[in-house]
Amino acid sequence: MIVCNDLHKGFGDVKAVDGISFQVPDGTFLGLLGPNGAGKTTLMRMMTGLLAPDTGTVEFDSRLMDRNAIGVKQVIGVTSQHVNLDKELTVEENMEFAGRLYRMRRNEIAAAADRLLAFLGLDSVRGRVVQGLSGGMKRKLMIAKALIHDPRYLFLDEPTVGIDPKARRDIWDFLHVQHKEGKTIVLTTHYIEEAQHLCDKVMLIDGGRIFREDTPEALIAQIGRFKVEYDTGERMEAEFFTDLSGAKARAGKLDVPCSVLPSTLEDVFFHYTSKEVEGWK
């Protein structure tokens, strides 16, 4: 289990994370959602020991995480927002280098690389230099590297940003399998569909604080599973309903063009904060 206790982190006058506490039971697929600047990446960097909190603690199975917590870091895998591969090495060499950092034997590295590259569709390019790969292939390789040592916990910061829909779906399928096999996964994403498709728990973050957390289905049910959207002439309005029949009945009474749609996590965010979620897709 991961336990975060009263985490604070500031940069000058900006409170990036402002008193966040929560627990992540083993086997959870947790999504951290919020607009740009909400504090998601700062929180994840503290959870993975890449950034020291001003105050507060992070524990993995009662073991404290900090920059020197080698034992804890052996059981986590991390991918960053930014491509951090060695572009002059081949796919296979990147995997070997990652395995050596965890002091794995050559045969262990080879077996893990074979399995991961095959599953992610990278086996045919294992001899290619990374610099010549597509964006989707690079993202897949980053995830494969993070899993080379078979960690119990996987942290993914915007793992599918900037790639094509097919590659994104491939990664979703792979992460779904990892979750089914028992891995605890923590994800930040700008893609609403990604969180709703993958995560069994979601935390909505704004201003460095958690303001709602539950399953995606439960969060959406709190405001209504269906919505009627229409243009008042000044702005778009949305009304929410518990069932489709209620939404259709309301739409039938409007004298302006309208749409009946399923509610999303973005609707939940806007409902509670009255903020447009800039950067979400």
Image (cartoon, rainbow, N blue to C red):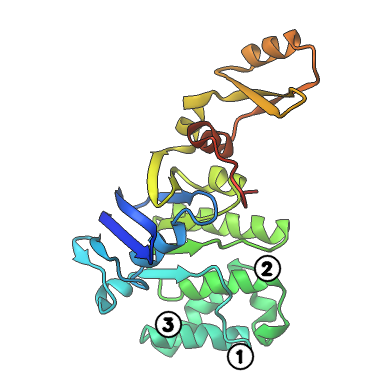
Classify 14 as above or below 80: above
Residue at 65% x, 69% y: name it: 121
| Left or right, 265 with reference to 11 | right
Classify 70 as above or below 200: below
* Residue type pointed to by label 3: Glu
Find disc 2 in the rendering and name its residue.
Answer: 136
Q: Residues within 10 Å of mark 2 (few under 14, many from 20)?
A: many
Residue 77 position, x and y percent, is 42, 70
Classify 199 as above or below 68: above
Structural distance between the alpha carbons of marks 1 and 2: 17 Å
Mark 1 or mark 2, earlier in chain: 1
> For residue 108, which numbered disc appears in the image?
3
Structural distance between the alpha carbons of marks 3 and 1: 20 Å
| Left or right, 279 with reference to 143 | right
Pointer 3 and pointer 2: residues touching (CB < 8 Å)? no
Mark 3 or mark 1, earlier in chain: 1
Between 84 and 35, the one lying in front of the other is 35
Q: Give the structural element (helix, strand or loop) at label 3.
A: helix
